[in-house]
Image (cartoon, helix red, strand yellow):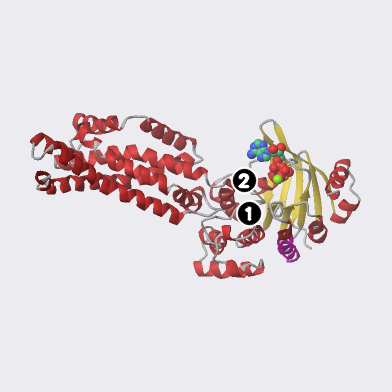
Amino acid sequence: MEAFLSNIDRVVDGFSWTVRLTLISALLSFVLGILLTAMRASPVPLLRGIATVYVEGIRSTPLTLVLLFCGLGLNSALGVALADSVQWDVFWWAVIGLSAYTACFVSESLRAGINTIPLGQVEAARSLGLTFTQNLRLIVLPQALRTVVGPLGSVLIALTKNTTVASVAGLGVQEASREMKLMFDQGVAPVLPTFVGFALGFLILILPTGYFFNWLSKRVAVVR
Amino acid sequence: MTSTPLVVLENVNKHFGDLHVLRDIDLTVNSGEVVVVIGPSGSGKSTLCRTINRLETIDSGVITLDGQPLPAEGRGLARLRSDVGMVFQSFNLFAHKTVLQNVTLGPIKVLKQGKAAAEARAMELLERVRIANQAHKYPAQLSGGQQQRVAIARALAMNPKVILFDEPTSALDPEMVQEVLDVMTDLASEGMTMVVVTHEMGFARRAANRVVFMADGQIVEENTPDEFFTNPRSERAQDFLSKILTH
Ligand SMILES: Nc1ncnc2c1ncn2[C@@H]1O[C@H](COP(=O)(O)OP(=O)(O)O)[C@@H](O)[C@H]1O
Ligand SMILES: [Mg+2]
């Protein structure tokens, strides 16, 4: 345990990358998820089609494949670089892969939320003269979001854990599990305490997230 | 009363799949007029209302508002809808907004009124439907009758040319029906143009200029309320009235 604790700065550094990956990907996937949901609710068949194909397609692709596609396919093979240093280049590719993947789950949650909104409210808004986007922005999404705070929390938790795939899947991104594996490989500390230490780290990130989203979902619930 | 045609339906037809829900509908609603639409369930009354603000499209025929044909889509359609108020059977208030916000939403977002002006006007309207003291509550905290009065204020806030009421009291507990009908009667006497789907005969006799009887997607009979209720001409209307009068 002592050997593990003397390397605590490496652990903290690993988790700082996990947090960065998670937060940035969460933000991007939230924005993309809302966009996909808006497209899927839109009256334009082409937009609906594109969004549906995207969500169904990516949702049924393993995350490993999505990240490998970003890392090996786009980054290495096609040579698309997003930053000057390799470290940041792979970081941003990982963010893109994770966001592209997670957005589908955000969108699915939101769509379930939209389905709970009585059609009558949408028609009432329409009959006031609100446009499709106003209706979505002012009536539909605010209520849908409130009903899916809990499920969105679960999506965020899954995303936090999914960041560990980014180092395995060809990208070699810095994050907590990669740091753990390096510490194993370099034999800097015994396996069991290292393992428990990193598991605890994830627990510390994830438990409060779950509690927070539970609390929030009760707070913002719309009474009907 | 002026007799400027405000809402005109000419030869309107509408199908839901094989079902012919509106058959050659001709109807003119003059400015300031109150028209009550009555008829058995499934006869197309709701559909008729919904075509007037284009919540439903029509297959053939022409609908004009104030001489203008209804726009098909886009901004023009949104503007048309803001000229045609709609009050639904199930109130349909926005659950995440307060009473006041429900009433000011349209004026602020569609008519681009300032917040203060919209709120001042909303309070006047809430006063008029006798619910101003509940302005900061959420819909779920109100009774059905109160919610429906808010819905009427919400429609009025747009300064519509005509308001469509689709069975506004059918979802209410009996003791709340009158408070809503009273508000509607006031509106009628103030000259608001109204199309009201309702089976409330008291209201029809008191407030309506005309009763339109529908059956199977057709307008079967049109008359003054007194004539219609005392001397229905068609067999369908006689049959229908005998049914609703016996309970
Ligand atoms: N969206 C719809 N899709 C298919 N059929 C519908 C739809 N809306 C109404 N109908 C049918 O059209 C007919 C007329 O309905 P409606 O206008 O609601 O009648 P009313 O309001 O007089 O009871 C009914 O037979 C009803 O089942
Ligand atoms: Mg109906």
Residue B55: image tag: 2
Q: Which region of the structure is painted magenta? A: B177-190
Q: Quadrant of residue A73?
A: top left
Instruction: Count residues near mark 1 (Cα–Cα under 10 Å), then give few for <14, some for 14-19, many for 20+.
Output: many
Question: Is residue A169 in the magenta section?
Answer: no
Q: Is mark 1 within 8 Å of ligand 2?
A: no
Question: Which residue position is annotated with label 1?
Answer: B91
Q: Given the image, on which type of amino acid does mark 2 rest?
A: Leu
Q: Quadrant of the N terminus of chain A?
A: top left
Ranked by sequence position, the earlier of labels 1 and 2 is: 2
Chain holding disc 1: B
Element class at badge 2: loop
Where B45 falls versus B16 (above or below)?
A: below
Of the pair B236 and B81, the residue shown nearer to us: B236
- Horizontally, residue B208 falls left or right of residue A192, namely right
Residue ID at (43%, 39%): A108
Q: Main secondary structure of the magenta part?
A: helix
Question: Is residue B186 in the magenta section?
Answer: yes
Whether residue B59 appears in this view of the structure is no
The mark lying in front, picked from 1 and 2, is 1
Residue ID at (44%, 41%): A39
C-alpha distance separating marks 1 and 2: 16 Å
